[in-house]
Amino acid sequence: MNASAPAPTPAPAPRRARVRAPELVGEGGWLNTGGEELTLADLRGRIVVLDFWIS
């Protein structure tokens, strides 16, 4: 039998404060929404792909 001491457990990582994302404001309306306004709360739990571009 090996009588060595157990390895020490690592210290837990410090907790980071949760920061809410700012609401996205679509100037000129949102594309592909049928004219509906969207909020981040409406999209919670869904996968969202954002495409930022400048014309």
Image: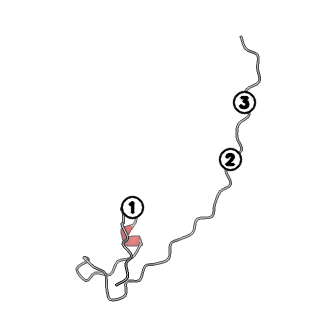
Identity, as a three-letter code, of the amino acid under mark 2: Pro
Q: CA distance from mark 2 to mark 1?
A: 27 Å
Residue identifier under label 2: 12
Mark 2, residues whose alpha carbon is within 10 Å: few (<14), some, or many (≥20)?
few
Q: Which amino acid type is marked by label 1?
A: Gly
Residue type highlighted by circle 3 = Ala
Q: Position of residue 47 (x, y in %)?
A: 36, 62
> Crowdedness of circle 1 by 10 Å Cα count: few (<14), some, many (20+)?
few
Q: Residue at x 35, y 77 (%)?
A: 38
> Mark 3 highlights which residue?
7
Dot label at residue 45:
1
Contact, CB < 8 Å: mark 3 with mark 1?
Answer: no
Left or right of 51 on screen, residue 31 = left
Residue located 26% across and 77% down the image: 33
Instruction: Identify the secondary structure beneath mark 2.
Output: loop
Which image quarter is the N terminus in? top right
Estimate the x, y position of residue 18 in percent, counting from the top left: 58, 65
> Would residue 12 appear left or right of 25 to someone viewing this image?
right
- Among the 4 quarters of the image, the one containing residue 35: bottom left
Residue 6 in the image, given as x and y percentages of width and height: 73, 26
Say if 15 sits above or below 30 in the image.
above
